């Protein structure tokens, strides 16, 4: 028998490998037809009487009707958070607060599939990412900060920490549940109460989260979720009853917020845009680096503030890196976010797609060379093919501005000093990556790169124990780790 098998000719290798569709079922998620505002532990109709439709960016299908909160609604939510803060939450022993936060973490994990499907539907990101990154790391943040709630005195010895009061939290559309977790977990651990506004394009996982709060028995008013567009966010920023604003989003809006609260005494943390350099030295493990470049820019369609959107390659390996990169790009599967084999999903909104298209056009006009993978994009929904620009000058808009899409700009360097100079030649300073076999070179680079996070031989790694935040126009304040607690405390 064994001899027979040896003589049998090997099966022909197929010329093309086609994946069968592997869609995740939508059945696990049940959206309400309409979602009111989550204030005082229950859903209420907006006083504004206004509603809007939230859609699936992959198909433009209507998913649910969402309340548009205005000044009066913001006022009710802040009042509810203030009552909850004064009537118990801030005086609860840390060990008791920890129990609620721990319960939230556990329920999120129990309902992880439902949250992953809802997130992919409403944001357009691939289920592989929402299932393996967004939801587990969101739960990990609640677990992590549950652990700190009764240890604040140890985290800041001899400084007598106290909660700030009501935190107003405004989050973007690229990581809706994860940003919610980054904001709510440390705020509650420190004894604050919360009014949170998700982006108007991605409200659904935040609204599902209100059910988790109810399931966990969280006292009414500790977490309030209000929906609406930028006007709702602006009303929160102006509200005198809010003690602290935590914002993640564009640098432009971040600057407006800073101006609006100047002189009010409100505390502020800003996590804004980025234009990270991913720096590849000629002694690196090349295939590993190419995976890191792909993950750095095409993860979440490049809609990531810390995306490695500027690739700096050492000149001696330039041709080799570009050839390997293009080959790897051509294997990326773009399409249905709910398909488990999808690598790149839908762009979050038509506005974002227009922004990406406009910047890519400017790259062509300024003289860069464009390469896009051949892929059939669906007829409906918002899509952009993975793109790389070579022959890029530092002055081009695609090398300076945040594109927030699956678009990579490649530059070269000869020496480590030149790499540092080019990497730092940006208004931003959120993250950077260094690929080299030399540990000492990673440390040398990390000391000189003006970026809040520097990854060595990896990219886009997130851990609740590790602080994250920016320099320059990428904002200030840190989220995550022990540093993330400080943003929600005052000290005697
Ligand atoms: P925004 O900064 O407008 O949105 C972030 C959040 O702020 C959303 O909840 C938004 O509401 C809200 N908001 C909008 N205007 C105001 C305001 N005047 N006062 C208070 N809150 C406000 O980002 P965009 O969605 O417009 O994206 C634009 C660009 O910003 C992207 O192309 C990207 O470059 C960058 N960006 C960076 C992010 C990051 O993680 N650092 C995240 C998102 C965007 P709503 O969305 O409902 O309008």
Image (cartoon, rainbow, N blue to C red):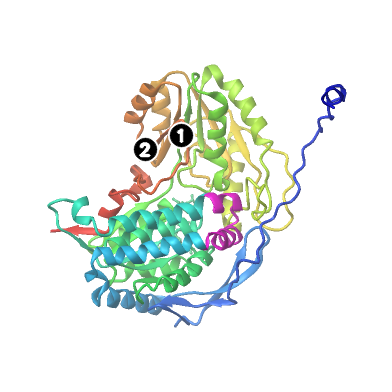
Relative to 140, say whether 308 is above or below. Answer: above
Q: Which residue is mark 2?
A: 451
Relative to 39, say whether 197 is above or below. Answer: above
Relative to 342, say whether 178 is above or below. Answer: below
Of mark 2 and mark 1, the one earlier in the sequence is 1
Marks 2/1 in contact by CB < 8 Å: the verdict is yes
The residue at 49%/59% (across/down) is 109
Q: Is 127 contained in the magenta span?
A: yes
381 or 91, nearer to the observer: 91
The residue at 61%/61% (across/down) is 121
Please report the bounds of the magenta region as a residue range: 111-132
478 or 191, nearer to the observer: 191
**Which label number is shown at residue 277?**
1
Q: CA distance from mark 2 to mark 1?
A: 9 Å
* Horizontal relation, residue 158 to residue 262: left or right: left
- As drawn, which residue projects farthest toward the top? 316
| x and y percentages locating residue 99 in the rendered image | 33, 65
Magenta stretch, overall SS: helix
The residue at 22%/61% (across/down) is 263
């Amino acid at each position: 028998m064994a001899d027979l098998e040896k003589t049998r000719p090997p099966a022909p290798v197929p010329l093309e490998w086609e994946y069968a569709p592997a869609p995740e079922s939508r059945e696990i998620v049940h959206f309400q037809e309409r979602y009111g505002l989550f204030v005082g532990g229950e859903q209420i109709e907006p006083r504004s009487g206004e509603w809007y439709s939230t859609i699936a960016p992959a198909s433009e299908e209507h998913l649910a009707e969402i309340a548009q909160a205005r000044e009066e609604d913001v006022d009710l939510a802040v009042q509810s958070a203030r009552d909850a803060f004064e009537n118990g939450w801030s005086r609860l022993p840390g060990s008791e607060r920890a129990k609620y936060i721990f319960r939230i973490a556990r329920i999120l994990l129990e309902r992880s599939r439902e949250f992953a499907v809802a997130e992919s539907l409403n944001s357009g990101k691939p289920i592989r990412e929402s299932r393996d990154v967004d939801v587990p790391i969101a739960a990990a943040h609640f677990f992590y900060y549950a652990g700190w709630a009764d240890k604040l005195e140890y985290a800041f010895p001899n400084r007598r920490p106290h909660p700030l009061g009501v935190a107003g939290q405004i989050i973007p559309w690229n990581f809706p549940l994860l940003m919610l977790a980054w904001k709510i977990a440390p705020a509650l651990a420190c004894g604050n109460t919360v009014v949170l506004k998700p982006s108007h394009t991605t409200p659904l996982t935040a609204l599902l989260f209100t059910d988790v709060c109810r399931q966990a028995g969280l006292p009414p008013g500790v977490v309030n979720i209000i929906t609406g567009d930028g006007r709702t966010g602006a009303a929160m920023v102006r509200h005198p009853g809010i003690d602290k604003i935590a914002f993640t989003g564009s640098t432009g809006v971040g600057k407006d917020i800073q101006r609006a609260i100047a002189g009010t005494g409100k505390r502020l943390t800003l996590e804004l845009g980025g234009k990270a350099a991913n720096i590849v030295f000629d002694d690196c493990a090349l295939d590993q680096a190419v995976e890191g470049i792909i993950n750095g820019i095409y993860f979440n369609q490049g809609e990531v503030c810390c995306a490695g959107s500027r690739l700096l390659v050492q000149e001696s390996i330039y041709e080799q890196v570009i050839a390997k990169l293009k080959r790897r790009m051509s294997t990326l599967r773009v399409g249905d976010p709910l398909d488990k084999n999808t690598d790149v999903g839908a762009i979050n909104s038509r506005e974002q797609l227009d922004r990406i298209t406009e910047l890519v056009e400017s790259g062509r006009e300024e003289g860069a060379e464009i390469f896009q993978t051949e892929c059939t994009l669906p007829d409906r929904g918002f899509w952009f093919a993975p793109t790389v620009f070579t022959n890029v000058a530092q002055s081009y808009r695609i090398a300076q501005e945040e594109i927030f899409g699956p678009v990579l700009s490649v530059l070269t360097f000869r020496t480590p000093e030149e790499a540092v100079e080019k990497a730092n030649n940006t208004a931003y300073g959120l993250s950077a990556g260094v690929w080299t076999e030399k540990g000492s070179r990673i440390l040398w680079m990390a000391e000189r790169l003006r970026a809040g996070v520097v990854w060595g031989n990896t990219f886009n790694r997130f851990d609740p124990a590790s602080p994250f935040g920016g320099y320059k126009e990428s904002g200030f304040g840190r989220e995550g780790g022990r540093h993330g607690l400080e943003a929600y405390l005052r000290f005697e």
